[in-house]
Structures are given as structure tokens and as C-alpha cells.
Amino acid sequence: MKHVYGALLGATALLLSSPSYAETTLTIATVNNSDMIRMQGLTSEFTAKNPDITVKWVTLEENVLRQRVTTDIATKGGQFDVLTIGTYEVPIWAKKNWLVPLDNLPADYDTGDLLPKIKDAVSVSGKLYAAPFYGESSMVMYRTDLFEKAGLKMPDSPTWDFVIDAAKKLTDKAGGVYGICLRGKAGWGENMAFLTAMSNSYGARWFDEKWEPQFNTPEWKKTLSTYVDLMKEAGPPGASSNGFNENLALFNAGKCGMWIDATVAASMVTNPKDSKVADKVGFALAPNTGLGKNANWLWAWSLAIPAGSKKTEAAEKFIAWATSKDYTKLVASKEGWASVPPGTRTSLYQNPEYLKVAPFAKPTLASIDAADPNKPTVQPVPYVGVQYAAIPEFQGIGTAVGQQFSAALSGSMTVDAALSAAQSSTEREMKRAGYIK
């Protein structure tokens, strides 16, 4: 008996000391968007199946997340094992060998099911360097009841002229309803995501083929002055502080006639738990000016492993779980099909259960398909990216320009002064980085 007991103790000790049973703590950095917050609530489903892995979350506001994650990966700080990053960072960081390629995803993960536009955006030389958690473009979300009352009919693909006219007609400041809510909070991924997409539809671009900044052109002047005038006349007060989350709260409270923003918001504005106007929302493509480009972007919040992590096996396991078809089914079982993370898999857009409850599914897919990161503008450009230029310097440049444009919106700077400041600060940085002389 003693021998058997001794052997059992020895086997237990061996199991506990072997690496696959040693407890691993994964530290995951993520953004405070509702899909990510929902994922945190479902983490126990993952840890129940992987009792040797503990998950620790660091949840940050979008601009702060970008800053913290970029600093950590550039300095090889090793604070995080899984990063939430976007389509902007993936190709740049993969080429610097800052990310671990996702080579060991299980066969049933089915990378072939990922939407081609999104898959390409998170791959380099055919290798996946991040797994998309949700994908998005942007579109118009609007109040069908207010449109009806004003005698307006939203076209499937509206022009900016139509949107501007409708915004003015829908505005009832005394009643606390504003014709349009748009991002104003400074940041390359906040107000500049919206304004860059808008500028594409007006024929503007960040740089010409020789990398010369273009803020001194009539196209940019038209974009910024149209935006500032529209927001003054038909936007909410304090708009220069509003990003995605702030505008979502305004729209759900019934304060916005229209909101042009990420397609991912569609399930949030139609969820009766969160939205007072859930049954009164329609969708249309982002506006255009007839030049062949709509004001829609392309983005995916994705999960990636920094090269500094010592826990890559556990990290890849978590990423495979959180971005799988089974995770989608798990969210559907808890919250309903309308709430699943959108914009990453072809199979979702062929799923009759999803299509039945998601009136926004078709416009979302059409918006993603319409975005072209390789030809984002009317005139040719030397960069890739719809609402950003995929060069390492863009984070700093885009944030500086975002601050100048936010100042124009708040009225502390004129449109001309903001464009002039944007031109000179961008020229200075492009010279410093060696793109121009």
C-alpha cells in the first residue's frame, strides 16, 4: 500500500511540476468598447476549459490603450501577453518583428472563413499576425421616426448634401435633439478616423505621391469647413470632447437624428437594453460627393501576441477561443444573435439566424466590401490605409492634426489656422523622418 501511495504522490508531483499544468497568468490589454467588456464577462468559459490559465484584464480608453501598448511593445517592456490592436499597427509591427505569427491556430479555427478584406489587413506575406475580434467599416445610423416626421427619406447611398440638409431639418435644440452627432475628440483613431474618411469622399488626401502633406488644398478646406459648420448648426454642445463612446450614449438617449460612425455600433443602437430608440433606427452607406468614394473606413480590433511575451502558447489558445466561431455561438446563446461580434467571418453573413435579427448585417458587409485600403482616395497616394496612412510616424502626426481640428471645432482656432498648423506640423515631421527634403 505504501508503495502505491508513494507512486501516486510522485505522479501527482510530476503532473504539478510539468509545464502544461503549471498555472499561467495572461495579462491582456484591451479597449473599453462593449464587445470587449462582454468578452471579459465570458472569460470564465475559457478558464473552465483551461484551468491552468488565469486571465488578468487591463481595460483602457482607446487613446490611452494605443499609447500604453505602443510604448510597451517598442521598449520590449513585456507588460502584456495579448494586445488589442488595429489594422494600422499589425503590418507595421509585424515587419519590425514585434508580433508573434499565429501559426498554431487549431484546424477548426478555419482561417479561410475570415472575410478577405479583414484577413488581408491583419496578415503580412500571407501569414496571420493578429486574429480579428470584430471588423468594421462606417455607415449612417439614423432615426426613422424623426425622418418620417420631417418628411424625409434616407437613400441607401446618401450624398453629403442630403445629409447636411437633413441634419439641419432634424435639429430641435430646444427639445434636446441634434440633427447629427460626429466624432470631435482629438486622436488619430478618434476624430481623424472620421475626418480622414470624410476627406476621401471630398477628393482630399493626406499626402501626394511624393509624400508632400496636402492640408493646404481646396479639398481639405472644403472637408474641414463643411464639418465645422455642420456641427455648429446641427451638432450637440461640447462635440469636441465626443468620441465613439460619448456619441453612442447620446444616440441611445435619443439625442441624435443621425450618427455616422463604426458599423459595430449597429447592434448597440438596436439593443432595447441599452437604447431608448432601439426600434427606430435605420442604416445607410456613409455619404459621398459623387467622386466615387464614400466616407467609410476599414478597421478590425484584433488580438495579437507581442514578441516580448513568454507565454505564447497560452496566449494563442486564448486568441483562438475569443475569435472563433464557437465564441460567436456562445455570445448568441447568452445575448442573442444580434449581439455577436460582427465583421470578421463570411459564415456569419450567411447565417439565417443572424440575418433574421440583424437589419444592419447587409449594410455592414456592403460598407466593409466598399472600403479599399490600397486605393483609398480619388487621386493616387503612396500609402495604404483608408482612415490612416500606414506609416510608423502616423500615430504622432495624426494625433497632432486631430488636436488642431478639434480646436477648430471648439472655436478656439479658425478652420484656416487649423489647416495651416496641420500643414506645417506634418511637413516638419515628414522632413524629420526623411520622407521629404
Image (cartoon, rainbow, N blue to C red):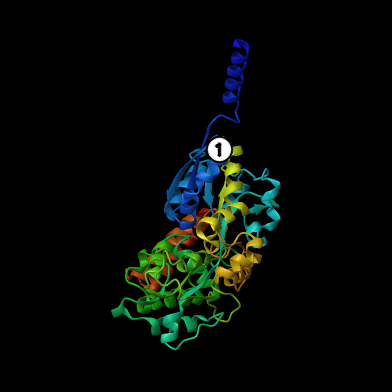
* Viewer-proximal residue among 416 and 140: 140
- Quadrant where the N terminus lies? top right
- What amino acid is found at the position of numbered circle 1 in the picture? Ser
**In the rendered view, does 369 fall on the left or right side of 66?**
right
Residue at image position (55%, 58%) is 332
Q: Where's residue 216, x and y in %?
A: 48, 71
Using the rendered view, name the quadrant where residue 48 is placed. Answer: top right
Residue at image position (46%, 87%) is 152
Q: Is residue 324 visible?
A: no
| Residue under label 1 | 309
* Viewer-proximal residue among 52 and 304: 52
Using the rendered view, name the quadrant where residue 374 is placed. Answer: bottom right
Q: Residues within 10 Å of mark 1 (few under 14, many from 20)?
A: many
Q: Residue furthest left?
A: 174
Q: Is residue 353 visible?
A: yes
- Quadrant where the C terminus lies? bottom right
* Viewer-proximal residue among 219 and 427: 219
Q: Is residue 152 above or below residue 278?
A: below
Using the rendered view, name the quadrant where residue 373 is placed. Answer: bottom right
Residue at image position (63%, 67%) is 352
Q: Where's residue 242, x and y in %?
A: 38, 65
Q: Where's residue 247, x and y in %?
A: 40, 67
Q: Where's residue 375, x and y in %?
A: 63, 68
Q: Residue furthest bottom?
A: 151
Q: Residue furthest front?
A: 1
* Viewer-proximal residue among 395 and 435: 395
Q: Secondary structure at mark 1?
A: loop
Q: How many marks?
A: 1
